[in-house]
Image: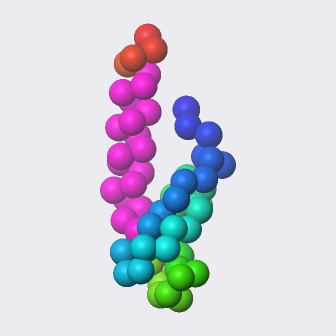
């Protein structure tokens, strides 16, 4: 349901620098390098996928 090429800002937990990542990028590779502080950031891909599925399910229920 979601357009997985849409990019969202992901703030670095270390320095706050916001990196734009697509939903597809987050799902396929939950680790990225922050351009602000050069640290590797690991996102919880399984939790992200679960949250995305929950949001899709809620939208489906709204538009029935």
Q: Looking at this rendering, what residue extends furthest in the top direction?
A: 64
Residue at 41% x, 51% y: name it: 49
Say how the picture is coloured: rainbow
In this rendering, the answer to whether 49 lies above or below 58 is below
The magenta stretch spans which residues? 42-60
In this rendering, the answer to whether 63 lies above or below 37 is above
Residue at 53% x, 82% y: name it: 36
Task: Determine if the magenta segment contains residue 55.
Answer: yes
- What is the x, y in percent for residue 39? 47, 87
Residue at 37% x, 58% y: name it: 46
The one nearer the camera, 44 or 33, is 33
- What is the x, y in percent for residue 47? 33, 56
Image quadrant holding the C terminus, namely: top left
Could you tell me if residue 24 is visible in this image?
no
Q: Magenta residues: mostly which secondary structure?
A: helix
- What is the x, y in percent for residue 31? 49, 75
Task: Determine if the magenta segment contains residue 23.
Answer: no
In this rendering, the answer to whether 38 lies above or below 41 is below
**Quadrant assignment, res 45:** bottom left
The one nearer the camera, 16 or 29, is 16
Image quadrant holding the N terminus, namely: top right
């Amino acid at each position: 349901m979601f357009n997985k090429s849409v990019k969202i800002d992901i703030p670095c937990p270390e320095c706050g620098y916001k990196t734009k990542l697509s939903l597809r990028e987050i799902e396929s590779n939950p680790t990225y390098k922050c351009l602000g502080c050069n640290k590797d950031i690991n996102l919880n891909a399984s939790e992200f996928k679960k949250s995305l599925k929950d949001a899709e399910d809620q939208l489906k229920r709204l538009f029935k």
